[in-house]
Amino acid sequence: MYKSIFVWMNCIVMAYATNTKLLSDVPGINKWIIIRGIIGSMCFMLYTFAVTKLPLSLLMIIFQTSPFWTSILAYFINNERIYKLEYASMALCFLGVCVVAFAKDQKPNNHGFSEELLGIAAIFIMSWLYAGGNVLSRRLKDIPNLQIVF
């Protein structure tokens, strides 16, 4: 939470120093800028929660599925095309993620099963939110970067 507040405060200082508006003059775009900022903050909070519940290797493997979700969301939201080669590449990479996730012995942690399940749910939701934030950033591509960060 402190990180998110610090980033937002930093944006205000940078906007003042560069004489840039934090919100856009384009009608209807400010709600998307604010949603993008909330998504980024939620991602960080979910990550910090999940890191206390899961082994770091498992957490990062689940998080690294976000490029798959980004491609899928971009297809449906931004009408971006997914080529056959990309489907094959995603399938191969997903198989690799599964092999890495299940190939090595996971040391038992001190958390119960339900806490580990909460951590898996949190990092999975974070992966989807991260993908959604990327897709939303693409939609905001004509907006100055400082406004997207805010």
Image (cartoon, rainbow, N blue to C red):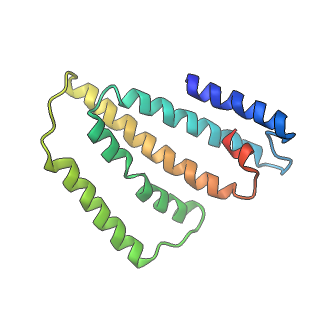
Where does the image place residue 53, in percent across and percent down from the top left? 30, 27
| Nearer to me, 4 or 129 | 4
Who's the residue at 38% across and 42% down the image?
124
Whether residue 145 sits left or right of residue 45 in the image: it is: right
Q: Is residue 138 above or below residue 40?
A: below
Where does the image place residue 31, in percent across and percent down from the top left? 72, 42
Whether residue 56 sits left or right of residue 132 in the image: it is: left
Identify the image quadrant of the N terminus: top right
Query: To which quarter of the image does residue 149 belong?
Result: top right
Where does the image place residue 136, in percent across and percent down from the top left? 62, 52
Who's the residue at 42% across and 52% down the image?
66
Who's the residue at 80% across and 37% down the image?
15
Q: Is residue 76 above or below residue 48?
A: below
Identify the image quadrant of the C terminus: top right
Where does the image place residue 13, in percent across and percent down from the top left? 77, 30
Query: Residue extending furthest bottom?
Result: 84
